[in-house]
Amino acid sequence: MKFKIRFLPSGARALVDRDTLISDAAKAAGVVIRTPCNGNGRCGRCNVTISKHENELQNGPENSGGRKEKNALKPDHMIVLACRTHVNADMCVSIPPDDDGIIASNDHRNIEIHDLTPIAAPMKCNANNYGLAADIGTTTVAVSVVDMNSGTDMYSASGYNTQGVHGDDVLSRIEYAHEGGTEELRRSVVKSINDLIDPFVRENDKRNNEKGLTKDDINAVYVSGNTTMIHLFLGIDPSPIREPPYDPVVKEAEITGRESGLHVNADAMVICMPSPAAYVGGDVTSDIINSEMDTDDGLSLLIDVGTNGEVALGNKDMMLVCSSSAGPAFEGGMRSGMMAKPGAIDSFKITEGRFEYTVIAGDRAKGICGSGLIDILAQLFIHGYIDKKGKFTDKTSIETIDGKKSLTIAEGVRISEDDIHDAILTKAAIYSASRSLIRNLGANIDDIEKIYIAGGFGNFINTESAIAIGMLPDVPREKFEYLGNASLAGAKQALLSSSARNRIGEVFKRMTYVDLSSDPLFSDEYISALFIPHTDFSQFPTYADHGR
């Protein structure tokens, strides 16, 4: 028996079998409902409202009875989890407004390139010569369009990787690909990139502006990302990554614009940043190039804060790299989490018991982005609202919502003990990976001259907060340098500079991968880091008194 499903606000429809999950019905209708926990019902992020009214199935609730209900849920409407609820009747499914849209900017500025040597020349008689840099993160996709003739950054945009409907972590995507979903995941990430660049191309279309451009003016593409994301972009099943000997199917690749499916010139070269290992990808190669740590005499540490936490340690003579699964806690993965966009709490402090915070664009608080979450954890710990295990103390007034102990940060924005637990797992993975590389080299933290922090929200992390929770080492603050999205920046450098392209090849050959999964040092470090800031207070002298 089949049932009719109508999704709002898009109006998309599907005809599905009884007992089909609402999340699967959405896929059949071409509607995106994010399921960060891959359908385990744990994260609570796929809430939808269902109704079985015939008039709503046909027209939507705004046309039911001639008026739209506001701030009220009808008794016969139900809020359910799309990933756990089965279809057993014709129904109308309302999806909450999407807070994960495109963030774009048109800030024309010159990129600092000492040798402007574009990777491609204008094709045919067209003087326009644009390049596309793309960073495919597990959670977020970011792009930049650069004028390769002048070295000018014309446009940048970022948005969620829509592969997230199949889980927020790399292993969930690998599992889905193994079950036959490789092509679907490829189409999804290609669409994510095209959705980001299309508005710029449309805005500058030659039909409206003689000095504008079309997609045929984009003559080269450099794609950076972790190894799994690069495989899926190429339409290659990444399953061998998770099985011995854990080798990528491809480490380097170049295809054409036509083969990629991107909205660029069909003959454009599309180059993927080389990935040295299964869980250390081209994003780390790109980070290293952007930081220039590969040219220094002194020892530097690079930490890429993302869903797949990656770390590099080295100088001009050697380079160790590793990866640990950090998870999406700092990239909008918690229940009140969101990208750094209007409405996101991006900083937080407690003053005489009062919660004070800033919201991006000064809007009403809608959620918490990564920098805000790090501040919240640090402040709650420093002021005694949570203990070193991340549990709420009797100092704060908590409430139980859906069986979870939660603290209200702002109206409608809460943090639960589960959220705090996930954040502790994330910070522990990042810190212990760094410590493991340093110990594997036989060095100590004092030997490190520079610590580079990369990642989409890297520029906005409060150093003191990150140290207070045990995510970054407690060292002199002048050693830290924040790079922002170095993966995207490195891809732009590759488009514009032959010296950068030469260094990419040299760094790729020089990198030595350290497998943390079989490293006893990492196991010990990780367990010790599962507290705020750490079980070894001597590693965090600044905040040792708070943890005792």
Image (tube, grey):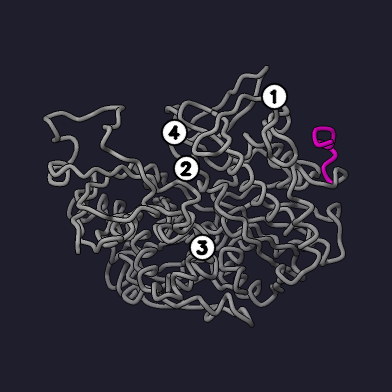
Residue at x-position 56% and y-position 68%: 282
Residue at x-position 42% and y-position 44%: 107
Label located before the other in sequence (2 or 4): 2
Q: Name the residue beneath numbered marker 2.
A: 338
- Alpha carbon distance from label 1 to label 2: 28 Å
Q: Name the residue beneath numbered marker 1.
A: 395
Task: Give the structural element (helix, strand or loop) at label 2.
Answer: loop
Q: Name the residue beneath numbered marker 4.
A: 366
Residue at x-position 16% and y-position 46%: 57
Q: Nearer the viewer, residue 102 or 74?
A: 74
Q: Name the residue beneath numbered marker 3.
A: 491
Residue at x-position 30% and y-position 65%: 263
The magenta region covers: 539-548
User: What kind of secondary structure does the magenta stretch mostly adopt?
Assistant: helix
Is residue 156 something that shows in the picture? Answer: no
Task: Give the structural element (helix, strand or loop) at label 1.
Answer: loop
Single out the mark in the foreground, 1 or 3: 1
In the picture as drawn, the residue positioned furthest to the top comes out as 352
Label located before the other in sequence (1 or 3): 1
Contact flag, marks 4 and 1 (Cβ < 8 Å): no
Circle 4: residue type: Lys
Q: Residues within 10 Å of mark 4 (few under 14, many from 20)?
A: many
